[in-house]
């Protein structure tokens, strides 16, 4: 059980509003795998923001307020996360289907956006830029690796990870609701330092559809883009956190991220100190400064 809890904790790592113009949608296309709130300033450059595992679009609220005067924002929320109905995500493959709908959304709206993704949203961003490079102007990846299992199993492969991923998937789905909810404070404390944000992150996890949650984790563990990033030419920014209370070996920790993206020359890495996985809650000013500088 200790192993399962450790893995669940680690996989949670996978895991706004100035100048409001009201909810808009890409003409001729209505997504079925996610919903979009369109905010910011119409006519300005487009930015798509994708939250992570079990998160709502609310994780971007503070960042959205800062970006809104200069960008048109598309705030996504994956169906099945944070209380949203599961819809088609309840069955079958989830991540590739979301990427296809993201592509359709972008094409229908005739935009060429920058895409910002946190955690699992960062993986979706990489998948989109990999399959449809013409869709994306720039990408911002917030604490995501192209194969996240490497964060805790340096020699992991998709095949060696599959049995463990399947066990985690099954146990997550079978876990009683009260036990799952009781585990959240411990899990969340490893992901965010901000005390108010801890409650928000935990509430989003508890409110998520467990099947969508578990299946998304399983798919993440079976997605290895290490070879793909070497061919990606889209300009990218990787923001990753650092907290010495959690990461005792600083050099080894940095190497995990730098090694993962070393074959992608278009990717710039920026470490945000004093933060855990949810950088937008722990160091919002530093994160915004890095994003705005990159987008300009």
Image (cartoon, rainbow, N blue to C red):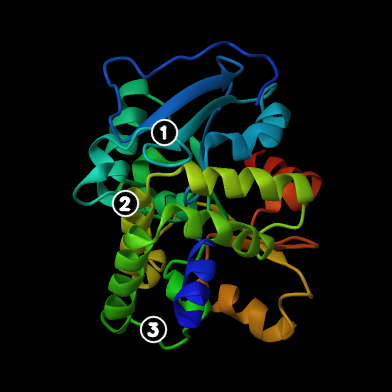
- List the residue tagged with mark 2: 211
N-terminal label among 2 and 3: 3
Helix, strand or loop at disc 3?
loop
Helix, strand or loop at disc 2?
helix
Residue 203: in sight, yes or no? yes
Seen in the picture, residue 197 relative to 225 is either above or below; the reply is above
| x and y percentages locating residue 235 in the rendered image | 52, 52
Tell me which residue sits at (37%, 40%) in the image.
Answer: 80
Q: Residues within 10 Å of mark 2 (few under 14, many from 20)?
A: some
- List the residue tagged with mark 3: 156
Seen in the picture, residue 242 relative to 237 is either above or below; the reply is below
Helix, strand or loop at disc 1?
loop
Alpha carbons under labels 1 and 3: distance apart: 33 Å
- The residue lying toward the viewer, choosing from 49 and 53, is 53
Q: Left or right: 188 with respect to 216?
A: right
Residue 105, disc? none
N-terminal label among 1 and 3: 1
| x and y percentages locating residue 144 in the rendered image | 52, 61
Q: Are marks 2 and 3 in contact (CB under 8 Å)?
A: no
Residue 119: in sight, yes or no? no
Tell me which residue sits at (65%, 26%) in the image.
Answer: 16
- List the residue tagged with mark 1: 84
Q: Left or right: 206 with respect to 237?
A: left
Q: Residues within 10 Å of mark 3 (few under 14, many from 20)?
A: some
């Amino acid at each position: 059980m200790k192993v399962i809890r450790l893995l669940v904790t680690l996989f949670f790592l996978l895991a706004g509003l100035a100048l409001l113009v009201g909810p808009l949608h890409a003409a001729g296309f209505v997504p079925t795998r996610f919903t979009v709130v369109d905010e910011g300033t119409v006519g300005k450059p487009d930015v798509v923001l994708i939250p992570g595992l079990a998160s709502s679009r609310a994780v971007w609220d503070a960042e959205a307020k800062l970006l809104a005067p200069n960008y048109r924002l598309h705030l996504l929320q994956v169906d099945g996360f944070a209380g949203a109905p599961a819809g088609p995500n309840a069955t079958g493959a989830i991540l590739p289907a979301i990427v296809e709908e993201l592509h359709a959304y972008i094409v229908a709206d005739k935009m060429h956006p920058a895409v910002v993704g946190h955690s699992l949203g960062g993986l979706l961003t990489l998948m989109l830029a990999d399959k449809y490079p013409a869709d994306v102007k720039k990408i911002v990846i917030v604490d995501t690796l192209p194969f996240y299992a490497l964060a805790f199993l340096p020699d992991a492969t998709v095949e060696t990870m599959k049995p463990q991923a399947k066990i985690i998937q099954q146990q997550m789905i079978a876990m009683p609701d009260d036990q799952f909810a009781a585990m959240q404070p411990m899990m969340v404390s490893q992901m965010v330092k901000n005390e108010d944000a801890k409650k928000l992150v935990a509430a989003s996890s508890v409110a998520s559809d467990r099947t969508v949650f578990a299946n998304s984790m399983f798919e993440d563990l079976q997605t290895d883009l290490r070879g793909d990033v070497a061919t990606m030419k889209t300009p990218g920014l990787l923001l990753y956190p650092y907290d010495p209370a959690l990461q005792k070996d600083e050099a080894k920790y940095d190497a995990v991220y730098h090694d993962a993206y070393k074959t992608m020359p278009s990717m710039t890495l920026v470490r945000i100190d004093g933060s855990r996985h949810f950088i937008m809650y722990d160091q919002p000013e530093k994160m915004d400064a890095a994003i705005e500088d990159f987008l300009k």
